[in-house]
Image (cartoon, helix red, strand yellow):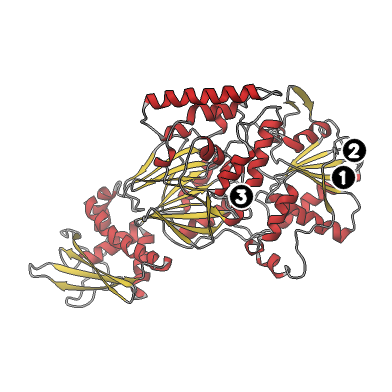
Amino acid sequence: MDIKIYPLGAGREVGRSCLIITINNYRIMLDCGVHMGYNDERKFPEFQRLIKKFKKTQIEEKEKEKEKQQETLNNNNNTNNNINATYKFVDKKNNNQDYSNVVDLLIISHFHLDHCGALPFFTELLGYKGPILCSQPTKAILPVTLEDFRKVMSEYKGQMSILKPEQIKNCVSKIETIEINETRIYKNDIKVTCFYAGHVLGACMFLIDVNGNRVTYTGDCNTIIDRHLSGAYMPKIYPDILMTETTYGDKIRQTKRIREREFIKKIEETLSRGGKVLIPIFALGRAQELCILIDSYWKRTNNKAPIYFIGPMAQKVNFYYKLFQNWMNPAVKSVFTQRNVFDFKFVQQSDKNLGDADIPMVIFATPGMLHGGFSLNLFKKMAPKTKNCVIIPGYCSPGTVGNKILNGEKKVEIDGETIDVNCEVFYMSFSAHADQKGLLQLVNNIEPKNLVLVHGDFDAMKKFKETCQKQINAKIIMPENKENVTFNECFKYEQIGMKRDLVKIIESLEKVKSNKNKSININSIIYDKKNNLIGLKKIKMFHKQNNKITNRINIILKNEDALDIFINIIKLKEKKCYNDFINLTEKKILNYSMNDTEDGNKKICFEYQYNPNTLDGNVINEKCLDVIKSFQLINKAI
């Protein structure tokens, strides 16, 4: 087994998620995002690193052709000949390469730009023509988010965009959709199963299985049930590798009720002194969550202060939240026939310039990190006044204005203008990311053999890794961008130092006589310094019966005490493997018998049955094989 992971983005950072995994020579790209904190070449993943060899002559010809097209485009534009430097970098350095032969499958976890913003550039400018997979709500909302991103990144700076609206539509039309718990197969060997991730509407976690080698990817996830979505869930599937986000891996948040109470309190305090409350927010996800909260509170208290939502996407996106009710939590579904919780009574859409208005009000404005658009324009006008307040409810990437004011900066430069920050600034985490407690819960439930940490700042990642090392039995890696990580043997059983410790373990075993010609008591402890442990001679597979596979595995033991010594070794060294062995045998899933061989040794025969067409069946197979493979690893260590 050979699994490789190569982050083009999200390695020790939050932003431009783009993770390349290679399993048995199949290469899958997980997400294709942009970094919201940069406006240069760092905004995009370095796609050109995917291709090592290509013909120089082909590049030169295509470069010349592209330069001619660009010259024509510039000559035809009478208003502005400036191409956004970020897009120019992507176009210039990454075209002319056949990415469809490099990437076998591209998976998008959800519609946030740091996970999907680079997708149209990869397909329309760089020419990727392979399969793209995401959930149905994600595909429905992607045209809205990608078109808004195209406008914000070009028209906001007075620059033309290298992408056209037609290219956004063409990109989205190439996407295939998958349902929760559905499995899709690509190129005969790549099996992709989708699981509910919480976070935002349509967000998914994925299990990628290539010939029994399995990698899981959380994307962004939230394990807590909120006001409109359920929590993330993935069954106990024992993957070889789990790749998980760690945005809040170093934090344990207060309860939702306490955070909501503090949020409302700050809003009321600001309104009572005649100030305005600015809540920078993305139009999807947390916007709906906080609008439900404040709309219901206004309804209970009969508050008269106006609430505005400014952002071109809000009304469009709200339509999809009303449409995909099957993705909502049970509370929202239960009242759907009576009312739709997204039909807000007090929150009203507005396109007015409210920055100069001098009356108390609450303003939701996009985008959420104050890196452009309506929220940044409003902030410039509201920040100098002490009576106003800015509440930032989610993560802000380094380099954004939101990140700067959260770090206490009292003067920020925006478009060459220095803005005094005299207003109150509060961070109240309504982020839809799981905190440390939620991430640990997810990891413990999935039980991976190896854990790869991505999508988190270095400090948060490091703290989460230290916490995991105390609680879980898995190898933990936190790769940097462009660092190639290879997994040759994805077992959780540590071989390092086992040979050194084996003598001490055997010497510490309590001597108990075994009863010959009787079944081995798995709780007995045998002491024998002369024992040579376990030689795996032959695996006999298999016959089919009623769509099930029966595996019979014969293992030659040097003597009848070897099984007891093996059990006690894994009991001391590998508690998880020992518990699996006990559970499997007690439940009669894994049966075994011991007999004499012709040459005087002992032969133990393991037998179990499973259905390869079901997830539970494959989990049984994985558990049983893990127990058997541990024989091999101990044998290698001796």
- At a point 76% along the width and 43% down the height, the residue shown is 311
Seen in the picture, residue 81 relative to 456 is either above or below; the reply is above
Residue 351 position within the rendered picture, expressed as x and y whole percent measured from the top left: 82, 42
The CA distance from mark 1 to mark 3 is 28 Å
* Other-residue count near label 2 (Cα within 10 Å), few / some / many at <14 / 14–19 / ≥20: few
Seen in the picture, residue 300 relative to 129 is either above or below; the reply is below
Camera-near label (2 vs 1) is 2
Query: Please, what secondary structure does the residue beneath circle 3 have?
Result: loop
| CB within 8 Å, label 3 to label 2 | no
The CA distance from mark 2 to mark 1 is 9 Å
The reply to whether residue 250 is in sight is no
* Other-residue count near label 1 (Cα within 10 Å), few / some / many at <14 / 14–19 / ≥20: many
Residue 98 position within the rendered picture, expressed as x and y whole percent measured from the top left: 42, 36
- Give the residue number, with chain letter if any, for mark 2: 357
Q: Examine the image and state in which quarter residue 204 appears.
A: bottom right
**Numbered label attached to residue 361:** 1
